[in-house]
Amino acid sequence: MCENCLRDHALITRLGTKGHDVVVIPIYLPTPDTIKSADAPVPPFYGAVRVYLEHRFPVFKRAPQWLKRWLDSPRVLRMAGRQSGTASSRNLGELTLSVLRGENGGQAAELDTLCNWLRDTQQRPDIIHLSNALLLGMARRLNATLNVPVICSLQDEDTWIDAMPEPLASQIWAEIRTRVSDVAGFITASQYYADKILPRLSIPADRVRVVHPCLDASRYSQPHPSDRHAHPVWNVLLDPDDDASLRFILQAFTHAKQHPSCANLHLHCSGISRRNNRLDPQTQRHVQCSPLMTNAEERLAFIQSSTVYTVLHRNAVAFDLSLLEAMASGIPVLQPNSGANPEILTLAHGGTLFEPDNAGALTETLISLLNTPTHLATLRQQGRQDTATRFAIDRMAQETINAYEMGLGLVVSG
């Protein structure tokens, strides 16, 4: 299960316990089995395989219905879902723009099918929540058909769009800006991302609420046996084949190994499909590289096998839920002072920040952590405690409800 799925599963479950009926509508791919809505299972709309083929090869629009049903079948869509993590935005720019154009795009019939299904087969919702800004093309027609407000989450759309070639990237940003007025309110994953994305989309601040992703800390509450490692382990999660970040980490690791407290330090980098052979043999035997872990259980095991945990991205992200998973597991985090990291560690004191892009600063901070066992123990305890209180699911559920009320006009924003 991906980070967003973990967050959504927890939110949907908690909204249900608070007496709210939630219907989860899969777009492109089926939702994970763990995400349950209040109603019967809902079929996916905009089936990813069929919609892509119809956009790329228009002849598929005239395909027989049996073939379209097969392309939309759970088996085919799950196979596509297993490959979705490797999909590049560079190859999906034209389709993204078409979907954003909504009633004027190539998928207008898909949008009508969704609107008619909501109108004819479900109780009329009080509010509709779109999971990201790339779905904003749906808002205008949904609102017109159902006469209900639409809320939209904002999280890391810029990373996806900016990787696209021009002029597609600029056209997509322009189309999103024309669709902002179709939405009653927005939810961002962090204040950092709100400050970053609102000016770019010309969204008024009074139409935005910050709701931090949270998790059920009870799933991670017990200290992990990693505390009893025979040697310290620094686990680092990288974007797939991010060679620049790998070189940065290896530089800091090599220098840290020269200090007595880190002489037996082991490094494991996930996200790297090929081994780096430029290290000396003595250092090399303490370094492990592995491909990115897409399985949630494997990723959690990787996090919990750490003495210290770090996650680096090519670009600063709106929020990284794996930091909460680490701290809830009693694993101190070591993060660059960038993106949402300062925001997270201001609320949960289970880690330490270092100056970004400064291998010397990272080395010094890593040595300081491993050379002070009492400080590490304090971070373990404080991280577990603060994650359970500051990033509790009840808090996320209530703040989401508040954002819905803002969209419904029941409360004054601000």
Image (cartoon, rainbow, N blue to C red):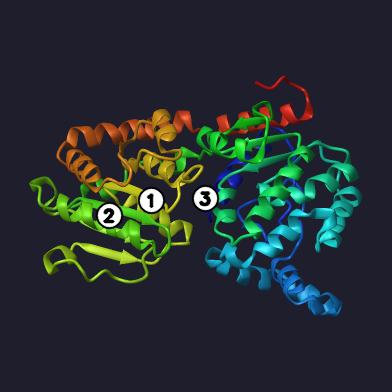
Question: In this view of the protein, can residue 36 be seen by the observer?
Answer: no
Vertical relation: 411 (above or below) 355: above
Tag 1: residue type? Answer: Leu
Is 271 left, or right, of 37 in this rendering? left
Quadrant assignment for the C terminus: top right
Q: Residue 374: x percent and y percent?
A: 19, 33
Of marks 3 and 2, which one's residue comes earlier in the chain? Answer: 3
Give the residue number, with chain letter if any, for mark 1: 312
Give the residue number, with chain letter if any, for mark 2: 249
Give the residue number, with chain letter if any, for mark 3: 3
Which of these two is toward me, 82 or 356?
356
Of marks 1 and 3, which one's residue comes earlier in the chain? Answer: 3
> Does dot 3 land on a helix, a strand or a loop?
helix
Distance from disc 1 to disc 3, alpha carbons, whole Å, reads 15 Å
> Does dot 2 land on a helix, a strand or a loop?
helix
Most distant residue in the front direction: 167
Distance from disc 3 to disc 2, alpha carbons, whole Å, reads 24 Å
Residue at 44% across, 40% down: 339
Which of these two is toward me, 157 or 130?
157
Tag 2: residue type? Answer: Ile
